[in-house]
Image: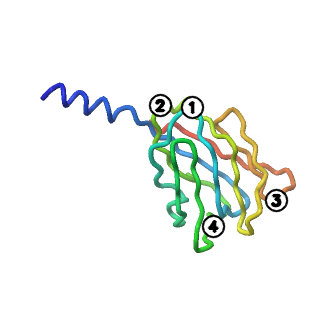
Amino acid sequence: MYKLLLIFLFAFSLAETVEVYYTTDAPIAGFQFNVEGVSVTNTSSGDAEKYDFIISANDTLVLGFSLTGTTIPAGNGILIVLDVDGNADDLCLTNLTISDSEAQPLVVTVEDCNSINISGNGLGIFDRFSFSNGT
């Protein structure tokens, strides 16, 4: 019985949580990004859930949007929480697409794999996404 308990505890201690934070001056109508360095096992919480976005994710891709036209308003908060297998410090986001309420892509750049700059107005005024290891 003790061996079974140790295996059970070991299996559940491997998953880590990563919170994706954002700040933006434009409403977010949708987002998509690849995740490298870890495998995504689940998504939850955050403003994507609060504003009834449909979230789809597999090991390496996260996609969020609303079928009803709801947007995440300009401001800041937690966009989404990712449960990952692997070391959360190895997480790196790539191939980001974030769109506004008119389905226009926002200007996005990634720095150091843990922060994303976006410009909602195309004028070069950047806002910041960042990530925190929630363990």
Dot 2 alpha-carbon crowd within 10 angstroms: few under 14, some 14 to 19, many 20 or more = some
Residue type at mark 1: give it.
Gly
- Give residue 46's position: percent from left, percent from top: 51, 55
Mark 1 to mark 3 CA distance (whole Å): 31 Å
Toward the top, the furthest residue is 3
Q: Is residue 41 left or right of residue 6?
A: right
Q: Are marks 2 and 4 in contact (CB under 8 Å)?
A: no
Sequence-wise first label, 2 or 3: 2
Residue type at mark 2: give it.
Gly
Sequence-wise first label, 4 or 3: 4
9 vs 129: above or below:
above
Q: Residue at x 52, y 50 (%)?
A: 57
Mark 3, residue position: 121
Mark 1, residue position: 37
* The disc label shown at residue 86, or none: 2
Mark 2: secondary structure: loop
- Give residue 113's position: percent from left, percent from top: 66, 35
Toward the right, the furthest residue is 123
Sequence-wise first label, 2 or 4: 4
Q: Is residue 44 left or right of residue 34?
A: left
Sequence-wise first label, 1 or 3: 1
65 vs 5: above or below:
below
Q: Are marks 1 and 2 in contact (CB under 8 Å)?
A: yes
